[in-house]
Image (tube, rainbow, N blue to C red):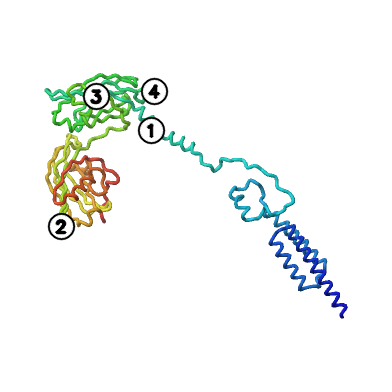
Amino acid sequence: VPWRNKAISSNLAVLQSEAVCNKENMADKLKDTGTISFLEAAVKISHTSPDIPAEVQMSMKDHIMRRTRIQRQTTEPASSTRHISFKRHLPRQMHVSSMDYGMDPPAVAEQPTSIGRIKPELYKQKSVDSEDPKKEAAKTCGKINFTLKYDYENETLTVRILRAFDLPAKDFCGSSDPYVKIYLLPDRKRKFQTRVHRKTLNPTFDESFHFPVPHEELASRKLHLSVFDFDRFSRHDMIGEVILENLFEASDLSRETSIWKDIQYATAESVDLGEIMFSLCYLPTAGRLTLTVIKCRNLKAMDITGYSDPYVKVSLLCDGRRLKKKKTTIKKNTLNPTYNEAIIFDIPPENMDQVSLLISVMDYDRVGHNEIIGVCRVGVNAEGLGRDHWNEMLAYPRKPIAHWHPLVEVKKSFKEVPLL
């Protein structure tokens, strides 16, 4: 028994020394912390089980080596064309530089690619292309030359249409047959028209037209020129229009003044719907808003007779919904009605920022539906003069504030929704 124990202890010492040597060799070759931990586990098994044959231990070592090679193959990048960000994070996740693979992979230069790269020049070119049609359309509408002169003795305004230049081609042959219509707004009953000039984009008209108008009315008149292309077999095409808001823009009209204007693109003649005058007055203590409809002028004719039967409807709106509506009396056969009628709404001061007024001028029809001539809106959320008039009323309480308001066509935003 003593000699057997002595042999066992010597065998154990030999096995331990071999295990330590194998452990150091494997650590030097692999430098892999996962593999070293696996070997340490095997050594612990050999310590607790000294009767494990040497063949089993060798097969275990071979298994460890094969497993290490498999891990090395699966974790190595497959190719150099992987995403750049993945390559950037790869050395941080794996200590690739500390691992000895026996041979270095061939260095493959990355090919620059334009996929996914933003090219500002493409967007710049696109924006330029998108603006070119607008500029081209503005250029191809052309220009028109005319003169104005006022005869103070006869109270007559003379409009002389001289020429047009660089008109757009409306016919298939690459030309147009232009002529000009002349209005002195807001009166559309009296209109003049030049002769038609065949197959030209640069016509010379040199025609004069006379509008009898008192001098005190010149400030409220507008000159409207509409350029058309004549078509014998179909509807005439509108080329564009010019609206001169201020007749005294160039001179006092005492002498003939030449004016050049750009022809603005248009597909239909713009119509002057007229104006309405009303006053606003708010009493904060009583919470009472008073709108006084004073009069209208130069309303659009809606009847065959050339007149209208106008009345005014005022709607109180809150968040686009109609709370109340009131209307004036009907004035028969007139385009310049006078009302002087007050419409009152009770609105608490804390709700004044939430409401607005929609003023609609209507044409009464005994048989069919009443037609809208034009509308305007006042309130905090209104635009332009409608907002300014409302703010002026709030700034000067208990004082009537009166203004003229131009009528416009009904927009989708102006449509009122009845409160259910």
Q: CA distance from mark 3 to mark 1?
A: 29 Å
Residue, disc 4:
174
Q: Nearer the viewer, residue 417 or 56?
A: 56
**Three-letter code for the amino acid on which mark 1 is drawn:** Lys
**Three-letter code for the amino acid on which mark 4 is drawn:** Gly
Q: Secondary structure at mark 1?
A: helix
Q: Which comes sooner in the sequence, label 4 or label 1? A: 1
Q: Nearer the viewer, mark 2 or mark 3?
A: 2
Q: Quadrant of the N terminus?
A: bottom right
Q: Nearer the viewer, residue 414 or 219?
A: 219
Image coordinates for residue 128, horizontal then vertical, percent: 43, 34
Query: Contact, CB < 8 Å: mark 4 with mark 3?
Result: no
Image coordinates for residue 267, horizontal then vertical, percent: 32, 32
Image coordinates for residue 26, horizontal then vertical, percent: 75, 60
Could you tell whether 69 is left or right of 256 in the image?
Answer: right
Query: Contact, CB < 8 Å: mark 4 with mark 1?
Result: no
Q: CA distance from mark 4 to mark 1?
A: 20 Å
**Residue 227, picture quadrant:** top left
Q: Quadrant of the C terminus?
A: bottom left
Q: Which comes sooner in the sequence, label 2 or label 1? A: 1
What residue is shown at x 43% (from left), y 36% (from top)?
127
**Three-letter code for the amino acid on which mark 2 is drawn:** Thr
Q: Nearer the viewer, mark 4 or mark 1?
A: 1
10 Å crowding of disc 2: few (<14), some (14-19), many (20+): few
Q: CA distance from mark 2 to mark 3?
A: 59 Å
Query: Contact, CB < 8 Å: mark 4 with mark 2?
Result: no
Residue, disc 1:
134
Residue, disc 2:
285
**Residue 33, picture quadrant:** bottom right
